[in-house]
Image: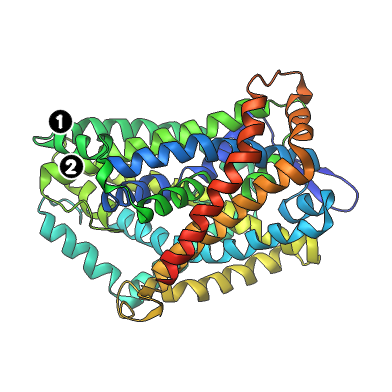
Amino acid sequence: MDTINTKNQKRDKWASKLGFILAAAGSAVGLGNLWKFPYSAGANGGGAFVMVYFLFLITIGFPLMLAAITLGRKTQLSAVGAYRSIKKKWAFVGGLGVVCGFFILAMYSTVGGWVIYYVIKALTGGLAEKNPQVLGEIFGEFITSPGISVAYQGLFLLLTLLIVLRGISSGIEKASKIMMPALFVIMIVIAIRALSLEGAYEGVKFLLVPDFSKINMSVIVNALGQVFFSLSIGMGVMVTYGSYFDRESNLLQAGTSIPILDTMVAILAGLATLPAVFALGFEASAGPGLMFVTLPAVFASMAFGNVFCILFFLLVLFAALTSSISMLEVCVSYFVDEKNVDRVKSSIIISIIIFIIGVPATLSMGPWSDLTILGNLNFFDFYDKLTSNILLTSGGLFLSIFVGWIWGADKAVEEIERNGTKFKLAPVWKFLIKFVVPPAVSIVLLNSFKEVLA
Ligand code: PFF
């Protein structure tokens, strides 16, 4: 990215057109696709979850992605400023995103720490194992050891901090050009291997053929939360990234390619994981450990399995970091832009606070598993539900009302067409953003409250 100066703040621009797509795709593609999508599908009825996910993706995810980057490009400001510059009272939506950033990164770093541990474990040959039970024990032993798992969580946050401190550096942009396609290719290879295992077909059927009787409110709530989480929508990341977009760029292209790419990675991760679950005797509803116990077994049954295992976890780590830096960036840029705090100082202090908030999430996998803070939710589950099902969802609701009604859908279309492209589906988009997204998200949100408080 090149740095240019406006009035009193430094503003970066994407070095290349690909820069935005890579950074936004980097934020979107992460643990949400590789780790969360397969286990959420596994725990929420497979095909039923995937079908509802697609429905929400098309009617809510796509329209909101476009709304977010358009708002960012129009105002050339990060979230709080973007809302405020159009309507002062709405700055709180950006603030909500900052709060969300703290909690989401707190839980994300728990899992990020697991990934680093698995990279090291793979490097030392400690994952060359086929037996589901042994793989479960390796995972279980690690996440329940408080000292080690907290240390790895800290390491993940430290890596995130170091990258953010150097600016959303051109280094990440350059690395993404290699890492993203590499991740894609390796996911295809793993999926092919998983699909060729004996008994894999059951898993494909489970993932892709919806059993309508499995659709209930909890499936609906989780599918919408997954759309927001996976696309990084609802906390201002895409508004901020869109603000680095120059006037000539094609918003439509960016707004559609990111959700498509993101979804392809999620489906590939599902096709790598769930067929193996059925073929190798794992449990589809195993929860957050699913990727960590199932995929090593697939690698163990592959030629050069250990190499694949190392590469896979390294790429997952890269994908997780390009997402975590976007979360930290939202928090840091708030304090830098709004409160005039020094960038280095605020990055360090915020990371420390996130670490402190995050430790209980990590401990709730082990010694604090029975410590519930709301209903029957432990810290990890609470942060997860609070962010995906309440904060991101509220952020998305406010975004749709703001762009559709306050700023105005027509003005947004004008901004989208500014570079000369014709937005043929503008009437459909306007209809969705004004009349479909707000009521649909409100209904799910109300039920999310019930779910969380139940
Ligand atoms: N989209 C990221 C993932 O799928 O891993 C997670 C995420 C990043 C959520 C940034 C929200 C966010 F603002």
Decide: is 74 above or below 330. above
Quadrant in the picture for residue 450: bottom left
Q: What residue is shown at x 76% (from left), y 57% (from top)?
A: 90
Q: Which residue does the numbered mark 2 point to in the structure image? A: 276
Q: Which is nearer the eye, 355 or 223?
A: 223
Q: Which is nearer the eye, 225 or 303?
A: 225
Q: x, y (%) of residue 248?
A: 76, 25
Task: Look at the numbered disc 1 and say if its residue's Cβ is closer than 8 Å to ligand 1.
Answer: no
Label 1 crowd bin: few (<14), some (14–19), many (20+), radius 10 Å = some
Q: x, y (%) of residue 247?
A: 78, 30
Quarter of the rendering occupied by the C terminus: bottom left
Label 2 crowd bin: few (<14), some (14–19), many (20+), radius 10 Å = many
Count of residue discs: 2
Task: Find numbered disc 1 in the image and state the secondary structure of the residue it sits on.
Answer: loop
Q: Residue furthest right?
A: 7
Task: Find numbered disc 2 in the image and state the secondary structure of the residue it sits on.
Answer: helix
Q: x, y (%) of residue 231?
A: 51, 44
Q: What residue is shown at x 16% (from left), y 37% (from top)?
A: 302
Q: Do residues under tags 2 and 1 come within 8 Å of each other at their CB atoms? A: no
- Give the numbered dot on residue 293: none
Sequence-wise, the earlier of marks 2 and 1 is: 1
Q: What residue is shown at x 35% (from left), y 61% (from top)?
A: 114
Q: Which is nearer the eye, 271 or 387?
A: 387
Q: x, y (%) of residue 433?
A: 63, 38
Q: CA distance from mark 2 to mark 1?
A: 9 Å
Circle 1: residue type: Ser
Quarter of the rendering occupied by the N terminus: top right
Circle 2: residue type: Ala
Q: Is residue 160 shown to the viewer in this render?
A: yes
Decide: is 360 above or below 272. below
Q: Is residue 119 left or right of residue 356?
A: left
Q: Which residue does the numbered mark 1 point to in the structure image? A: 196
